[in-house]
Amino acid sequence: MGEYFLIKWRDKGNRLKHKENYSILDLIADILIWIPEVLLFPIRLLFWGMRGLGRVIGNWLDVW
C-alpha cells in the first residue's frame, strides 16, 4: 500500500513540474464558447418559466 502512495506522490510532482500554462488562445476560445450561453440563458429561463406557469394555470383551470 505504501508503494501506491509513493507512486501517486511522484506522479503529482511530475504533473506540477510539467504544468501547461493557460494561454491567451485558450482564453479567447473560452470566451467565444461562453458568449452564446450567456446570451441564451435568460431566454431559456423565460421560456421555461412561462411554460411552467402555463401548465400550472392549465391544471388549475381543469379542476374547475
Image: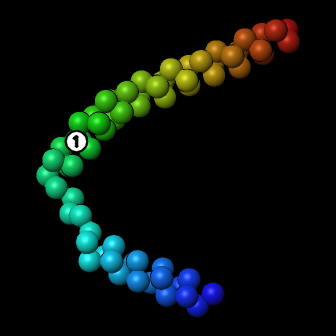
Q: Residue furthest bottom?
A: 2
- Residue 11, given in percent of the width and then of the height, sits at 40, 77
Judge from the rendering whether residue 45 lies leftward or rightward of residue 64; answer left or right.
left
User: For this rendering, which residue is in front, 25 or 37?
Assistant: 25
Tell how many labels: 1
The quadrant in which residue 64 appears is top right
Q: Secondary structure at mark 1?
A: helix
- Residue 9, given in percent of the width and then of the height, sits at 45, 84
Say which residue appears at 15% left-offset and 47% top-offset: 25
Q: Residue furthest right?
A: 63
Q: Is residue 63 above or below residue 19?
A: above
Q: Is residue 1 above or below residue 49?
A: below
User: Which quadrant is home to the N terminus?
Assistant: bottom right
Q: Which residue is mark 1?
A: 29
User: For this rendering, which residue is in front, 48 or 20?
Assistant: 20
- Mark 1 Cα shell of 10 Å, populated few (<14), some (14-19), many (≥20): few
Q: Is residue 52 above or below residue 61?
A: below
Q: Looking at numbered disc 1 in the image, what kind of residue is underneath it?
A: Ala
Judge from the rendering whether residue 22 lies leftward or rightward of residue 12; answer left or right.
left
- Residue 52, given in percent of the width and then of the height, sits at 63, 22
User: For this rendering, which residue is in front, 10 or 54?
Assistant: 10
Q: Residue furthest left?
A: 24
The image's colouring method is: rainbow
The quadrant in which residue 23 appears is bottom left
Say which residue appears at 20% left-offset and 63% top-offset: 21
User: For this rendering, which residue is in front, 52 or 35?
Assistant: 35
Judge from the rendering whether residue 60 lies leftward or rightward of residue 52; answer left or right.
right
Say which residue appears at 34% left-offset and 35% top-offset: 38
Judge from the rendering whether residue 39 lies leftward or rightward of residue 56; answer left or right.
left
- Residue 15, given in percent of the width and then of the height, sits at 33, 73
